[in-house]
């Protein structure tokens, strides 16, 4: 890893100021950033740790929304979101391993937008709002393809607002070495219809499976998906699975999620 | 270089760290606590697990400066006050829960977190919790047996891996 200056501000304002410097990058849990820096794929001049900012931490209920601070670790979401949004808590409890869940954060995961990460599926399927130091961004606009988001240079996610669904579930086919999703499906039923988001499968990152949403909005059951198949076009092909295999998993994992929804 | 001060195994300890100094390197090279092992250095194998403010973390993927002031427990802090092995460590010895021993510090630190959260885990829960700790000797069966025994459960009928 190339060396860098390390700063750890205690407020969002100080973090934003520190990030205005040349080649400065935010560091949250570091579960992806630090390994990529070790490989010298990334070499910031300054790392601005966000883990010392108490205002970015915690899970709280606000009416029909669950608001999660961006620097809240997965293990805390798994515990503190369980009563209000169990499917989201279960997703958080399946990320990585216990040590990764103690460090990795929801804001870091969303800002990185790894095409195989779990949280983007929950955010997109829930129609979540990503709140930053400057504005609020709807999940649809936030995710802009593999590792790409609507965030500007130096913009920090401060919290994520999840509308709480009537029922929901996440079904993940884990890649056993990385524990990322080879393909994962998050389904959520709301009063105005069902939403389905797929991670791990597409070269364009997380996406909504609109045909399944239409079918599930009129009949929220696995049977409603009979005959529906996702296209292998633009699916990821690598040593773990072909595009056709992933396209097949999209259907399988969506059915499992619908069956498990609660 | 910046001075970093931690409370390690109950003692205040200081050393110098660059921005990029990992907690694992800081513990081993600056504080001389070489019980924390670095296996893969890519946060997969879990040999470097320590507790930071009571939470198990992979110390090869935490910056030393990021945990300034924290309470850190390493394998060196696990023994009883008189120097004898604690219950979990003794169970690893009694049930041959180590072969080459390289992964053992991380296994003990992860397993102690499990038992703090879940004092009577099932065998499946132990295996699941230790997912982030790799034993290159593949000696998992006796590691799981040791953790079960340390939780006070009878392991006399445990004969084969699932």
Image (cartoon, coloured by chain):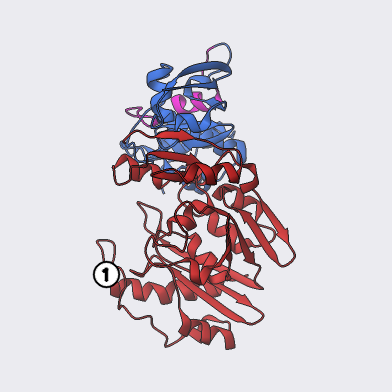
Chain colours: A red, B blue
Q: Is residue B59 visible?
A: yes
* The one of A230 and A56 positioned closer to us in this rendering: A56
**Residue sitting farthest toward the top:** B82
In the depicted structure, whether residue A148 falls above or below residue A178: below
Q: Residue at x 67, y 80 (%)?
A: A191
State the image quarter where residue A251 is shown: bottom left
Query: What kind of secondary structure does the magenta stretch mostly adopt?
Result: loop
* The one of A24 and A20 positioned closer to us in this rendering: A20
The residue identified by callout 1 is: A242
Residue B27: x and y in percent read 43, 23
- Look at the image and tell me in which quarter the N terminus of chain B lies: top left
Q: Residue at x 36, y 76 (%)?
A: A248
Count of numbered marks: 1
- How many neighbours does mark 1 have within 10 angstroms: few (below 14), some (14-19), or many (20 or more)? some
Residue A247: x and y in percent read 35, 75
**Residue sitting farthest toward the left:** A239
Q: Residue at x 54, y 31 (%)?
A: B52
In the depicted structure, whether residue A216 falls above or below residue A258: below
* The one of A218 and B60 positioned closer to us in this rendering: B60
Q: Residue at x 58, y 38 (%)?
A: A52
Q: Is residue B161 visible?
A: no
Residue A26: x and y in percent read 47, 45
The secondary element bearing badge 1 is classed as loop
Q: Which residues are magenta?
A: B83-103
Residue A119 part of the magenta-drawn span: no
* The one of A28 and B46 positioned closer to us in this rendering: A28
Residue B90 part of the magenta-drawn span: yes
């Amino acid at each position: 890893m190339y060396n860098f200056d390390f700063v750890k501000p205690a407020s969002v304002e100080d973090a934003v100021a520190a990030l205005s410097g040349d080649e400065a990058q935010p560091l949250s849990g570091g579960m992806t950033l630090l390994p990529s820096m070790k490989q010298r794929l990334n070499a910031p001049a300054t790392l601005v740790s966000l883990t010392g900012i108490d205002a970015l931490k915690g899970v709280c209920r606000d009416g029909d929304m669950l608001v999660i601070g961006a620097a809240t670790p997965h293990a805390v979401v798994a515990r503190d979101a369980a009563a209000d949004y169990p499917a989201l808590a279960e997703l958080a409890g399946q990320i990585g391993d216990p040590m990764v869940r103690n460090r990795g954060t929801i804001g870091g995961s969303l800002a990185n937008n790894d095409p195989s990460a779990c949280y983007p599926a929950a955010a997109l399927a829930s129609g979540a709002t990503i709140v930053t130091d400057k504005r609020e961004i709807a999940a649809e606009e936030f995710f802009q393809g593999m590792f790409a988001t609507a965030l500007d240079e130096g913009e920090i996610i401060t919290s994520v607002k999840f509308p709480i669904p009537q029922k929901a579930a996440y079904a993940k086919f884990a890649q056993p070495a990385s524990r990322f999703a080879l393909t994962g499906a998050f389904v959520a039923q709301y009063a105005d219809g069902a939403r389905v988001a797929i991670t791990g499968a597409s070269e364009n990152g997380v996406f909504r499976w609109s045909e399944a949403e239409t079918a599930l909005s009129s009949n929220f059951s696995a049977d409603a998906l009979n005959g529906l198949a996702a296209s292998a076009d633009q699916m990821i092909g690598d040593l773990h699975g072909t595009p056709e295999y992933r396209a097949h998993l999209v259907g399988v994992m969506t059915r499992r999620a619908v069956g498990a929804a609660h | 270089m910046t001075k970093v001060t931690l409370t390690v195994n109950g003692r205040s300890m200081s050393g110098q760290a660059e921005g990029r100094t990992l907690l694992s390197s800081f513990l081993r090279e600056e504080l001389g606590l070489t019980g924390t092992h670095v296996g893969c250095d890519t946060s997969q194998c879990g040999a470097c697990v320590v507790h930071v403010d009571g939470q198990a973390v992979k110390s090869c993927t935490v910056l030393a400066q990021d945990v300034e002031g924290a309470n850190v427990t390493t394998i060196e802090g696990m023994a009883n006050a008189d120097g004898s092995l604690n219950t979990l460590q003794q169970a690893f010895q009694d049930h041959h829960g180590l072969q080459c021993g390289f992964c053992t510090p991380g296994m003990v630190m992860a397993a102690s977190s499990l038992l703090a959260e879940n004092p009577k885990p099932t065998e499946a829960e132990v295996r699941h919790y230790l997912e982030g700790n790799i034993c290159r000797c593949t000696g998992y069966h006796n590691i799981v047996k040791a953790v079960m025994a340390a939780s006070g459960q009878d392991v006399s009928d445990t004969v084969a891996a699932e």
